[in-house]
Image (cartoon, rainbow, N blue to C red):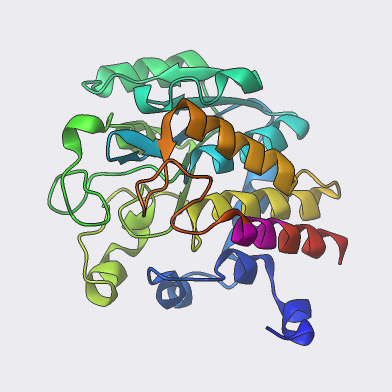
Amino acid sequence: MTEQMKKTETIEDVILRHSQRGMQVLRQFLPDDYCKQAAAKLLALPRGEILLTTGFYVAGYAETDGPVGTYVLARALQKLGFAPCIVTDEFCRDFFEPTGIPVEYAAFDAAKPDFIHLLDTHNPQAVISIERCGVNIEGKYANMRGVSIDEFTAPLDELVKLAKERGIATFGVGDGGNEIGMGNLAKEITERLELAPCTVEVENLIIASVSNWGAYGLAAWLSKLHGEDLLADFDECRDFIARTVKVGSVDGVTHEFTCSVDGFDMVIEQEIIDALHEKLRA
């Protein structure tokens, strides 16, 4: 990529670099500034609690895509005066406790009344899903290979659906088609990516080559619109990933306990984060 091309890149362009799973194909069906629009809607919300959900089951563990992006976005929201709370399941146990951000754990057999209680208790201004599996058009939770992971996935998409029914702002970040929020593009995913898409819709969908990058992009746009750099640096993100790998997290593509995400090593991770910070300085 030439220096001139880098200068004209948007934040949306940066988070769609290295696309390998068809997100560039889907971009035409979203506004050019889809990430900016989502950030503007977040900033306009009254300050209060925001629930963030993440955690995608892969080969016995939560994958490395999702948690660090959730952490970065939660920290940005804290700096803006919101009170984030992360909602996940046991596969992400001990990922977030060291950060001091509140965490709620949903049981794998959780049902609608549990999520009604959760919403009643927290009364959130928004619910944000980052790389979290949602039920697909075949009625199951499935991984990128189409294999059912029903028994390993707490039905947190029900939380998002209930929030939407209540008029609570909903946001979804995904990178493949089976994540919460991809129901917005279910028809396009079925026709162009030939997989069974998630059916769960959100008000604001953010697509990225890696969902963590989508969360970083949202934090970057929050920064740009607010006038303050709220985005974590590479070292902080790398250290978070390294710690979760040590606790028990794997790369979603290789299934290995490595500091990599969806097959991308930390060199690419730094490239994306540094590029986003460069956009904030522009």
Q: Is residue 52 part of the magenta span, yes or no?
A: no
Give the percent coordinates (x, y) of residue 76: 71, 38
What residue is rendered at 32% in x and 44% in y? 133
Classify 155 as above or below 213: above
Give the percent coordinates (x, y) of residue 39: 65, 51
Give the percent coordinates (x, y) of residue 98: 62, 19
Quadrant location of the N terminus in the rendered image = bottom right
Give the percent coordinates (x, y) of residue 269: 61, 56
- Asked if residue 138 shows in the view, the reply is yes
Residue 263 occupies quadrant: bottom left
Classify 85 as above or below 188: above
Left or right, 39 with respect to 263, comes to: right
Compare residues 83 and 279 and report the one nearer the observer: 279
What residue is rendered at 69% in x and 33% in y? 75
Compare residues 263 and 167 and report the one nearer the observer: 263
Give the residue furthest to the left. 138
Compare residues 68 and 199 and report the one nearer the observer: 68
Residue 280 occupies quadrant: bottom right
Classify 10 as above or below 269: below
Quadrant location of the C terminus in the rendered image = bottom right
What residue is rendered at 42% in x and 30% in y? 248
What residue is rendered at 71% in x and 53% in y? 220
Compare residues 150 and 2 and report the one nearer the observer: 2
- Asked if residue 205 shows in the view, the reply is no
Give the main secondary structure, helix, strand or loop, of the magenta stretch: helix
* Residue range corresponding to the magenta coloring: 267-273
Q: Is residue 269 part of the magenta span, yes or no?
A: yes
